[in-house]
Image: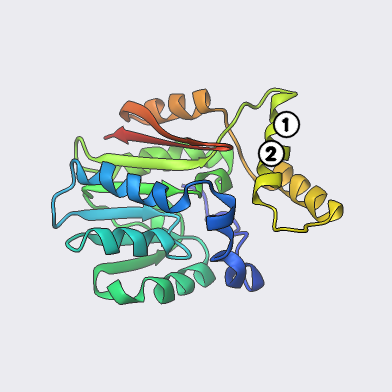
Amino acid sequence: MAQNHESNFAGDAVRSYLEGPPRQVPGFSSLHRMTAMLLAERTPENGRVLVLGAGGGLELKAFADMQRGWSFDGVDPSADMLQLARQVAGDHAERIRLHNGNIDAAPEGPFDAATCLLTFHHVPMPQRLETLKEVRRRLKAGAPFVLAHVSFPQTEPDRSMWIDRHVAYGAPDGADIGRLENARNAMRERLHILSPEEEEAMLREAGFSDVTLFYAAFSFKGWVAYA
């Protein structure tokens, strides 16, 4: 695997992070609930779950609240975000282990399930397929994997239209034109986005089967697939 990609999260960005996802992601809490339900279909009551992109701790807390018997290994390239996760999910600290890095920092498993929520659009394209393969390698046969992040058509004019929609939906009330344009430019330059069809093809190429779209909320998509 390549070295850890540079994280976009540090300092002030970490402190403001907890306000962002609930505003920017339609159905944010419902995404957590649906993910836990999909995992629970095949994950035992004492299951071990790998959470890729666990910084911030919001999904760790949600999953741990809903499934009292599961244990979690959370992985994230940002030490600052992992520190925030320790605070947010602190009530479940005895069931959570955190690892600083990308997928190569994760334990070998085997895990009963895995998730990667609202993270994969930060992973550079050259690392995407290998990351998925490494997730699958750490899963038991037939184990579920839930992947959800930004995904929309990458041909123009659809790409620019969806960038505009994404920024407009997630903008704070009263955001000025300059701030919105900066957000559009940051999205174009920093995020690594594929179309839904490309996402599904990559999951299959990585060895996952029964890839199913279960979540479509404006610019976000989510799939469940099986090792």
Asked whether, in this view, residue 142 is left or right of residue 169, the answer is: left
Across and down, in percent, residue 132 comes to 40, 39
State which quadrant residue 88 falls in.
bottom left
**Rendering coords of residue 144 (x, y %):** 27, 40
Identified at 35% across, 57% down, the residue is 106
Q: Which mark is residue 165?
A: 2
Residue 161 numbered mark, or none: 1
Q: Is residue 72 visible?
A: no
Rendered residue at 42%/76% (across/down)? 87
- Depth order, front residue of 140/151: 151
Position in image of residue 219 (x %, y %): 58, 37
Q: Is residue 185 above or below residue 196?
A: below
Name which residue type carries label 1. Answer: Met
Q: Secondary structure at mark 1?
A: helix
Q: Quadrant of the C terminus?
A: top left
Q: Are the residues flagged by discs 1 and 2 in contact, CB closer than 8 Å?
A: yes
Mark 2 lies on a secondary structure that is: helix
Q: Tell me if residue 132 comes above or below residue 98 in the rendering.
A: above
